[in-house]
């Protein structure tokens, strides 16, 4: 990464689901470039704070904010907490997600609801609450959504997840359209098949997934979380200042292939 270490100076970034596998790499990269980060997740406060300390983050750089972001009141509480740590939020990173694999004919209603709630509804709630505050505080900030290459490609057995990511891309584009005249931008990062977190779990536990995934990456290797983090550093930096409404595809070419 060739951005200077002060590329994100003055930024206060809130990331949902930030204690996850990719999230921690993103937080590390944001902090390394000068941002202060409020890291949200759903583990108890003592556990979240310990996780950040153990990962080597100084509390002057990264603090933990508990909240199940499918709940509007908890989204507001998170943003109150974040402002008490580091002042107004300049970027809200809607990153939390869950996946449960099954063909669509077998998907249980509760699993559909859970994936759409955590992935799409929570992104809407955080994007809405953060942008309302940016408008009230006169912040020319940004909303960034973590979507996926499967938001545009029908990868088997994760239909509700893919639908949620497609929905997030349109949510992002609508925020971008509606907020542009207020100086607030919205963009998305769409990673490929990452060798960490939810994809690695599927790779390790579902032989059929591993068989398909091992043939689906034109660049030939699983994506590193650091390569996802680099895309966030770019989008959070002034280098992206003329971008709004974009899906930044960082997928090693996965979406170029017809699926087997
Ligand atoms: N791993 C991949 O290959 C891959 C590929 C493309 C996109 N992504 C996306 O990257 C992001 C992170 O994925 P990951 O692989 O690191 O997964 P992960 O499971 O390691 O992290 C997800 C985090 O979200 C948190 N979370 C769950 N429900 C929540 C809620 N209601 N409120 C707040 N936080 C909640 C979890 O506790 C977890 O820490 C997700 O948006 C995912 O869809 C991942």
Image (cartoon, grey):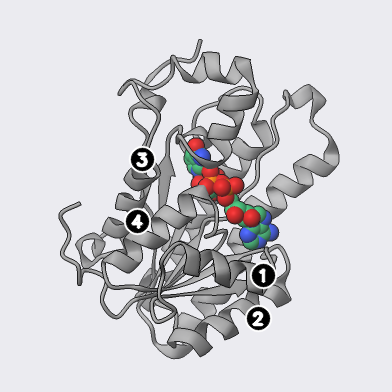
Against 75, residue 214 (above or below) is above
Tell me which numbered mark, 3 or 1, is placed earlier along the sequence: 1
Mark 4 highlights which residue?
A: 232
Identify the secondary structure beneath mark 4: helix
Mark 3 highlights which residue?
A: 249
Dot 2, how many residues are within 10 Å of its Cα: few (below 14), some (14-19), or many (20+)?
Answer: some
- Residue at 64 percent across and 79 percent down: it is 76
- The answer for how far apart the CA atoms under marks 4 and 3 are is 12 Å
Quadrant position of residue 91: bottom left
- The answer for how far apart the CA atoms under marks 3 and 1 are is 28 Å
- Residue at 44 percent across and 79 percent down: it is 59
Label pair 3/2, CB-CB below 8 angstroms? no
Label pair 4/3, CB-CB below 8 angstroms? no
Mark 1 highlights which residue?
A: 67
- The answer for how far apart the CA atoms under marks 4 and 2 are is 25 Å
Ligand 1 within 8 Å of disc 1? The answer is yes
Against 122, residue 100 (above or below) is above
Label pair 1/2, CB-CB below 8 angstroms? yes
Number of the front mark, 3 or 1: 1
- The answer for how far apart the CA atoms under marks 1 and 4 are is 22 Å
Mark 2 highlights which residue?
A: 77
Is 257 on the left-hand or right-hand side of 105?
left
Number of the front mark, 3 or 2: 2
């Amino acid at each position: 990464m060739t951005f200077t270490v002060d590329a994100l100076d003055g930024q206060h970034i809130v990331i949902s689901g930030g204690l996850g596998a990719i999230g921690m790499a993103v937080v590390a990269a944001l902090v390394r470039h000068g941002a202060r980060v409020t890291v949200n997740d759903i583990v108890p406060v003592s556990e979240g704070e310990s996780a950040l300390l153990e990962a080597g983050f100084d509390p002057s750089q990264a603090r933990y904010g508990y909240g199940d972001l499918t709940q509007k009141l908890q989204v507001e509480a998170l943003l109150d907490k974040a402002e008490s740590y580091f002042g107004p939020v300049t970027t809200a990173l809607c990153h939390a997600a869950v996946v449960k694999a099954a063909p669509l004919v077998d998907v249980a209603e509760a699993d559909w609801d859970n994936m759409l709630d955590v992935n799409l509804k929570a992104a809407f709630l955080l994007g809405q609450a953060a942008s309302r505050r940016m408008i009230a505080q006169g912040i020319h900030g940004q909303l960034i959504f973590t979507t996926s290459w499967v938001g545009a490609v029908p990868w088997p057995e994760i239909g509700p997840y893919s639908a949620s990511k497609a929905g997030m891309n349109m949510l992002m584009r609508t925020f971008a359209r509606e907020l542009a005249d207020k100086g607030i931008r919205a963009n998305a990062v769409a990673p490929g098949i990452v060798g960490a977190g939810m994809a690695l779990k599927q790779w390790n536990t579902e032989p059929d997934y591993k068989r398909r995934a091992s043939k689906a990456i034109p660049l030939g290797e699983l994506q590193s979380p650091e390569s996802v983090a680099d895309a966030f550093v770019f989008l959070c930096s002034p280098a992206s200042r003329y971008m709004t409404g974009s899906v930044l595809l960082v997928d090693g070419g996965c979406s170029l292939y017809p699926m087997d």
